Image (tube, rainbow, N blue to C red):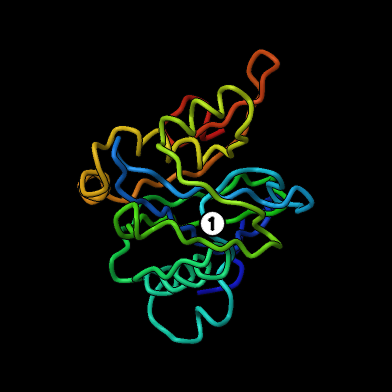
Amino acid sequence: MDEQRGADEGEQPTVPAATVIVLRDAHGGPEVLMARRNASLAFVGGYWVFPGGRIDGSDVAMGGGEDAIARRACVREAEEEVGLVIDAASLVAFSHWTAPPQAQRRFATWFYVGAVGAVDDAEATKVDGGEILECVWLAPAVALERHAAGDLPLAPPTWVTLWQLAKAADVADALGQARERGVEVFSTRMAVLDGVLVALEPGDAGHPT
């Protein structure tokens, strides 16, 4: 996997990255692990995210195709950022997001979803204290409500993922829906509509231009 992929003239090259959406079953339905990034970080500082980051040389060195490399990156990031051990083989490919062409840090990110044990077995998380300052388990709908209230900043890929997960009755249902839906591909482009900055995805009017 190339460290950076080529881009059209005037566009930033993309940097391969991987994110893992960690789920657990709770009494009221599935919960997802949300992690708060250090506000001092240049990229989405202070935002709530899923564990993840750029794919590095150690992920690539073990060989395999893009899927295998991205899965290894998910496992590594989960352990480094929140102290969780994830089984790479159990992950389900969820989506792929490419940041807008003009983004200063233009990541092309694979999202995978996976599960940990029951509530009593999944409490122990340990943040790295550098990039990640705290983490919390939340029902997807609760995370969206907190975002709407202004106390849980989310980037668009995180919001869309939570919206999709909010439809699931439990973890098995969430994983089943992901397998049935297949990998959704998002290639974001930004535009201004009536003075408001909006994100356009493939299929939206205006996305090609």
Residue furthest out toward the bottom: 62
Q: How many marks?
A: 1
In the image, residue 175 sits, relative to residue 202, either above or below, namely below
Question: In the visual, does 163 lie left or right of 53?
Answer: left
| Amino acid on which disc 1 is placed | Ala
* Quadrant (top left, top right, bottom left, bottom right) of the C terminus: top right
The residue positioned 75% from the left and 53% from the top of the image is 41
Q: Say which element carries label 1.
A: strand
Residue furthest out toward the front: 120
Residue furthest out toward the right: 40
Tell which of 44 and 151 is nearer to you.
151
The residue positioned 25% from the left and 42% from the top of the image is 170
**Number of other residues with Cα within 10 Å of mark 1, as a class: few under 14, some 14 to 19, many 20 or more:** many
The residue positioned 56% from the left and 51% from the top of the image is 135
Question: In the visual, does 163 lie left or right of 89?
Answer: right
In the image, residue 60 sits, relative to residue 29, either above or below, namely below
Residue indicated by mark 1: 108
